Amino acid sequence: MRPARGRQRTGLQSMDNRNNTIAGWVLFAGICALGLSIGTGMLSASHAPEKPGFPIEDTESASGGGAAAVPLPNLLAAADVEKGKAVFAKCAACHTIDQGGANGIGPNLFGALGKPHGHVPGFAYSAALKGVPGNWDFAGMDAWLTKPSKYAPGTKMSFAGLGSAEDRANLIVYLNSMGSNLPLPAPEAVPAEGEAPAEGAAPAEGEAPAEGAAAPAAGAAPAAAPAPAEAKK
């Protein structure tokens, strides 16, 4: 009986060792998995970039006409026809501009400036654009190129607009050179930044007097009218 008991005790010890080994490996695997999870989380943690990505241009804010905005006549005077031709490449997918060119998705644009909205025969303009009164002038073309959907709400033209005032001016002088040849408006006089009005100039209506201008003393009575001369006796 004793040898049997010894073999039983040995078998139990062997099973305990096996269970301990399995438990150890399970614990080791769990520790490895936890460490791997923590390490992966640290590597893939998101950080805000120091510099944001490419902003989407907002045509209205880009041409919003701040205090330092250059008047359109001045932009047109400084515009370049060749640069405008390069800008027209954005329009060439829908428009032709050569004399006698065919209509595409949009109408042929030869000689468009100075003519009524919706002037090309046979082209199916939207009622919104045909309903804009007057002819195409420089200011109207600039507003149209800034945001067509604002210039003619309901227009079929899907182009979002040109945010750069310089690009619009260059494109306008190019369009003008292609069959219209209207005289450009005279540039406006713009005071230099920080320049004060000429001395002695009257302030504009509603404008406060210049700083340091003499004001009547507090509580001072208005000057009395001169007394009439004593009647002769």
Image (spheres, rainbow, N blue to C red):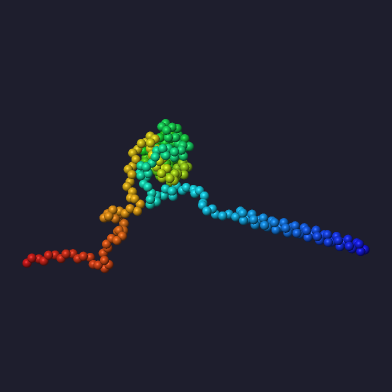
* Residue 66 visible in the picture: yes
Query: To which quarter of the image does residue 81 belong?
Result: top left
Residue placed farthest to the right in the image? 1
Q: Position of residue 21 (x, y in %)?
A: 78, 58
151, 4: nearer the viewer:
4
Q: Nearer the viewer, residue 111 or 172?
A: 172
**Residue 7: image location, x then y, percent:** 88, 61
Q: Position of residue 202 (x, y in %)?
A: 27, 55
- Which residue is painted at 64% across and 56% down in the image? 39
User: Can you tell which quarter of the image residue 78 is in?
Assistant: top left
Q: Nearer the viewer, residue 86 or 103?
A: 86
> In the current view of this chain or complex, which residue is farthest to the left?
233
Q: Which residue lies at the image location 91% right of the left edge and 62% below the top edge?
A: 3
Residue at the image point whose x is 72% and y is 56% from the top: 29
| Res 107 quadrant in image | top left
Q: Quadrant of the C terminus?
A: bottom left
Residue 110, horizontal then vertical, whole percent: 40, 35
Is residue 151 among what the camera can see?
no
Q: Is residue 46 left or right of residue 67?
A: right
Q: Is residue 116 above or below residue 189?
A: above
Q: Residue at 83% across / 61% down in the picture?
A: 13
Quarter containing the N terminus? bottom right
On screen, 20 above or below 101?
A: below
